[in-house]
Amino acid sequence: MATRLNYITALAVVGATTSVSTMAQELTVEEVIVTAQKREQRLVDVPAAITAISGGEIEQKGLRDIQDISFAVPGMALREDGPGSYQIFMRGLSNQYGTDALVGVYLDEAPLTLTGFDQLDARPLDLERVEVLKGPQGTLYGQGSVAGAIRYITKSPDLTAFGGSIGAQESFISGGDSREVLTGVFNAPIVTDKFGIRIAATAQQGGGWQDQPQAGIKNGNNQDLRNVRMKALWKPSDALSVQGTVVVHRNESELGLGYENPDRTVTVAVDRSRRLVAKQFDYDLYNLDVKLDVGIGELLSSSTYIDYSHHFPFSYIATDKTNYGAFAPGGAIIEGTDERRQAMHQFSQELRLSSSGDGPLNYTVGAFYRTLGSRYEAVYDTLIDYNNPAFPDEYYSDLPYLDKDRYESYALFGDVSYRLTDRWEVGAGVRYFEDDQETFNGVFTETDSFNSTDPRFYTSFKVTDDINVYASAGSGFRSGGFNQGALPNYQPEQLWSYELGSKGVLGGGVVAYEVAVFYSDYKDMLRRGLILNPDGTTDQNTTNIGKVEVKGAELGLTWHPFAQLTLNMTAAYMDSEVVAVKATDATNLAGDPVDYVPELSYTLGANYDFDLTATMPAFFRVDYSYRDKVSYIDRSVFYGQYLPFYSDDISLLSARLGVTLGKASLELFGNNLTNTNKWIDPYHEWTNANRTRPREIGVKVGYQF
């Protein structure tokens, strides 16, 4: 990493990566092409709800990670355990438990989801767009996409011209440290029209604001980040292309959990002055895509290998609202600080054939294989305070834990659609999935197998070439898994979702809209309970608790009232409720809201393009996002009279002013301008919750070549 002085010097001598278009904006909404259904289509033609954010819009908004993206997509929420550690929730479906994710994440064709707790941190750098697919995507994307899927579509090498950009950014955090970021993109056609490379890299340091006063740590959540993506494209003929991608990601943070108190301090369990082990989140990704035009369609082979390592602390402090009194006379308070290591290796292979989309019949058929090996090690440090002189406190240190898991799964899938007329299309798809699992907890080995067949049906009618109405019904699936010891294994979850929507362009291209209403029937939802052992450790008992119903509506609008001004609005309303509970379950009751689901969320944005001078185009952008409070309920851990626990309602305001002069540009920006300091996460009664980032004011400069 360059020194901080190098960053500041760079600010004076280079220009930022261009995020301002120098071309005059036409009075039409730009047509968006997506590949959500594994083939290129106009966004308006896809019979599903999709939020597509272009790479230019990502830069203009200053979105730098999945947490930022979640506030830009209504109805999406996260559980965050520090930089790089996210669980993504969407469409009223959210829980933290199970072997796989509820929302799958992809970098082009490469799956970034490892397990339900482990997804790779993809930085939005040098992107064509981000596609957020809402609702179950089981047919084309598999078991980890019950609630939706997120796809980062990166820019491929340009085989015709050299080019690139360099940029530097300096920003200042309210009550915290400064943040310095360097970015660079380099594109080179080694053999014109045949072979080329593209490298996109970013380096970041600083940006912290959390303190641990008892340990003398200031701004301890500074990040030391390096992310490099290298792509090579070979096109020996018009029919064949071979593209390889390598991603190297390294991130370290001293106070990397992300949990904090309202005063921006961090409280460490057992020993308040203890210095936690630094959080390290590292991975290497290797992907090879081979595409061949076979006449009847395009044949794709996509191979991905991931080497992932995560070394991190985990600190938790129960408050007097937890019901550990059930385990000991007089009540008990528990807290602990663990050192944890997770190492994983995943290989996946997809083979599929997709039609060209030129005729009335379109199809995608394929097969998918994955193998994942995981090793989890922890050293537990636990204190039990019985809060009763008759029962002395108990302290357990250096308790080791080992868990080794292996997953092997395969799937066969297909999706076929047919245009009955020029305007009416019908389609159906299905995916068969089988998952074989093995776990070893240091004492014994256990195996189990789970499978599912998930169909999808849809139809769409084009009122005009630019207005589409659609209806769909689809199934999603998430595999079962293991509990420890004599506890029974938990079984798969199943979801059926029904959606009616419309999307289109009105007024000759002045307005674009998307609207959808949906209903989801979520069966055998997984929840976790905790069992306290006599030695101070806890066992997790994950069970299928019952049934959840979700009702919701989503809306998106983009409007060009005149050529220089773009206004946009998105909104989501969701009613997600537990409606039936098995009698033996103590975690939820019928009528409970589902965790981490905001009832109402929306965004408002405005972008104005203008000419500062005849040769200096500029823009000014303002974005506002709002999200209702989200809840958390767990009666196996907390006393019922205190539930639900809630996060805060959150309003965030940001603005950016940019100007371009030739190949150089300058931007001034502010994030969280009102310096909102509120709970994002409702899990604060375990001292396990993060808050909104403080106000950030900065400057970004750079140069294109």
Image (cartoon, helix red, strand yellow):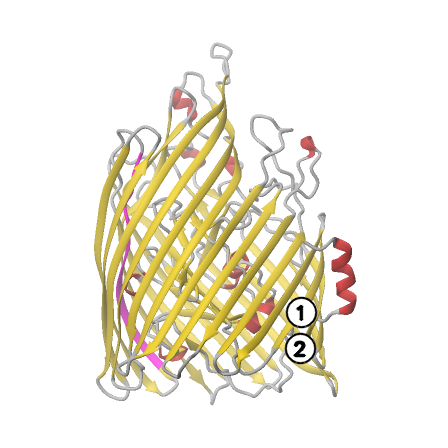
Task: Please provide percent x and percent y for residue 253.
Answer: 61, 45
| Image location of residue 426, percent across then percent down | 23, 77
Q: Secondary structure at mark 2?
A: loop
Whether residue 376 is visible, yes or no, is yes
Label 1, secondary structure: give it: strand
Q: Counting residues from the N terminus, which is met first, the one under dot 2 or under dot 1?
A: 1
User: Do labels 2 and 1 touch, CB within 8 Å?
Assistant: yes
- Residue 166 shows which numbered tag? 1
Q: Between residue 167 and residue 151, name the one nearer to us.
A: 167
Q: Amino acid at mark 2?
A: Phe
Secondary structure mainly formed by the magenta segment:
strand
Quadrant housing the C terminus: bottom right
Query: In the image, residue 398 lies at what x, y percent?
Result: 49, 24
Q: Nearer the viewer, residue 273 or 432?
A: 432
- Judge whether residue 546 can be spotted in this image: no
Circle 2 residues within 10 Å: few <14, some 14–19, many ≥20:
few
| Residue sticking out furthest to the top | 390
Q: Residue at x 33, y 61 (%)?
A: 349
Magenta residues, start to end: 468-483
CA distance for labels 2 and 1: 8 Å
Q: The disc labelled 1 sits on which kind of residue? A: Ile
Q: Within the image, what quadrant is residue 33 found in?
A: bottom left
Can residue 74 be found in the magenta stretch? no
Q: In the rendering, which numbered label is found on residue 191?
A: none
79 or 85, which is in the foreground? Answer: 85
Which quarter of the figure has residue 473?
Answer: bottom left
Kindly identify which residue carries mark 2: 705
